[in-house]
């Protein structure tokens, strides 16, 4: 019996961002909470590095075995990956004994749109 499950892929062009650009209008309390959670998760250098490793990995996903060498212990890597998942930045899928991570669809575009361009 396989634990593999397909994760839905969203079209970044049609996926709703987390919130409007900061220059468009003030954020609601709920939008601010959701956005702060994402940016707070990326505020840790190890988490930011892990997120970058996953986002830039060939094929758009990375096995935890390929991204564990970030200068901290394996339990610490797992903790940080969990925090990135809880913030909605990563999705994971277990395949056999390994877990594969990928950036949630449209997350990078939504975060970029939130910051907007001046």
Image (cartoon, helix red, strand yellow):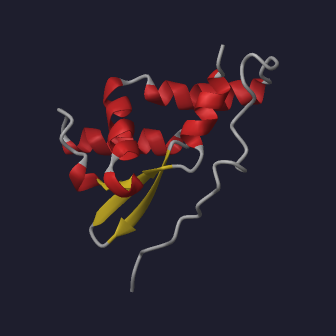
Seen at 59% across and 64% down, the residue is 8
User: What percent of the width, then of the height, locates residue 37?
Assistant: 57, 30
Name the residue nearer the viewer: 44 or 16. Answer: 16
Seen at 63% across and 49% down, the residue is 12
User: What percent of the width, then of the height, locates residue 92?
Assistant: 44, 57
User: What percent of the width, then of the height, locates residue 47?
Assistant: 36, 32
- Please give left or right for residue 17 compared with residue 79 in the image: right
Q: Which image quadrant for residue 45?
A: top left
> Where 25 sits versus 68, above or below?
above
> Where 117 sits versus 50, above or below?
above
User: What percent of the width, then of the height, locates residue 7?
Assistant: 53, 65
Q: Which image quadrant for residue 17?
A: top right
Name the residue nearer the viewer: 10 or 47. Answer: 10
Q: In which quarter of the image is the N terminus?
A: bottom left
- Please give left or right for residue 42 compared with residue 70 in the image: right
Q: Which residue lies furthest to the bottom in this view?
A: 1
Seen at 34% across and 70% down, the residue is 95
> Where 105 sits versus 97, above or below?
above
């Amino acid at each position: 019996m396989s634990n593999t499950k397909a994760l839905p892929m969203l079209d970044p062009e049609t996926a709703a961002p987390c919130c409007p650009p900061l220059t468009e209008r003030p954020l609601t309390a709920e939008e601010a909470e959701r956005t702060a959670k994402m940016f707070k998760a990326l505020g840790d250098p190890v988490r930011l590095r892990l997120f970058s490793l996953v986002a830039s990995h060939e094929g758009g996903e990375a096995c935890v075995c390929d991204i564990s060498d970030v200068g901290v212990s394996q339990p610490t890597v797992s903790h940080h990956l969990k925090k990135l998942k809880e913030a909605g930045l990563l999705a994971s899928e277990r395949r056999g004994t390994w877990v594969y991570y990928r950036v949630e669809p449209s997350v990078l575009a939504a975060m970029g749109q939130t910051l907007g361009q001046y």
